[in-house]
Amino acid sequence: MPELNVSLGALALKNPVMPASGCFAIEYSEALDFNQLGAMVLKSVSPISRPGNPVPRVCETRGGMMNAIGIPSQGLEYHRSQIIPAYSAFSTPLIVSISADTSESFASAVAEMALPSVAAIEVNISCPQPRSRRNGLCHVSRHNL
């Protein structure tokens, strides 16, 4: 069998297979052996609970589809107490994805999610916030470029 080990910085993985954030849930453990994955990446979580964007969230285009989900989340505390513990039965490294509106919120969320059971943190900068709150990491004035 070929050697598939990879490293993400100091994090050693047995293989490069990681389901994408938002496309993976604990319920899949009934059909997939999570211990065979390189890492498990959880759905993005925000500092506070938020519903995401109103429907419709998905539409067809000539070339496929577009979505504006808005990253619904039950918040960090719910994630810490209900979601993360469910993955402790697996030996595969756990990566938590964080979404926030400001760099300060990201820093605070990273500090709160830096748990012994979390191997790494993904920073989701896809900016789900509405135009009125665009002050996140990816909204940089062109004058600052």
Image (tube, grey):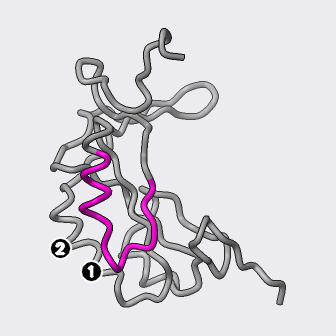
Q: Position of residue 119 (x, y in %)?
A: 44, 73
Q: Position of residue 89 (x, y in %)?
A: 37, 90
Residue at the disc numbered 1: 85
Horizontal side of residue 11 vs 74, given as left or right: right
Residue at the disc numbered 2: 81
> What range is drawn magenta here?
106-122
Give the SS element for disc 2: helix
- Mark 1 vs 2: CB contact within 8 A: yes
Residue placed at 18% from the left, 44% from the top? 50
Horizontal side of residue 140 vs 39, given as left or right: left
Residue placed at 75% from the left, 79% from the top? 4
Point out the image quarter for the N terminus: bottom right
- Residue 104 found in image quarter: top left
Q: How busy is the neighbourhood of tag 2: few (under 14 within 10 Å), some, or many (20 plus)?
A: few
- Please tell me the numbered disc located at residue 128: none
**Which is more toward the observer, 36 or 138?**
138
Horizontal side of residue 62 vs 113, given as left or right: right
Q: How busy is the neighbourhood of tag 1: few (under 14 within 10 Å), some, or many (20 plus)?
A: few
Figure check: 81 above or below 122: below
Q: Work out which residue is located at the far top of the displayed protein and give it.
A: 143
- Under mark 1, the amino acid is Pro
Q: Position of residue 25 (x, y in %)?
A: 38, 69
- Residue 68 found in image quarter: top left
**Which is more toward the observer, 43 or 76?**
76
Q: Position of residue 138 (x, y in %)?
A: 44, 29
Residue placed at 34% from the left, 34% from the top? 128
Magenta span includes 112: yes
Point out the image quarter for the C terminus: top right
Gap in angstroms between the C-alphas marked 1 and 2? 7 Å
Figure check: 23 above or below 86: above
Figure check: 5 above or below 57: below
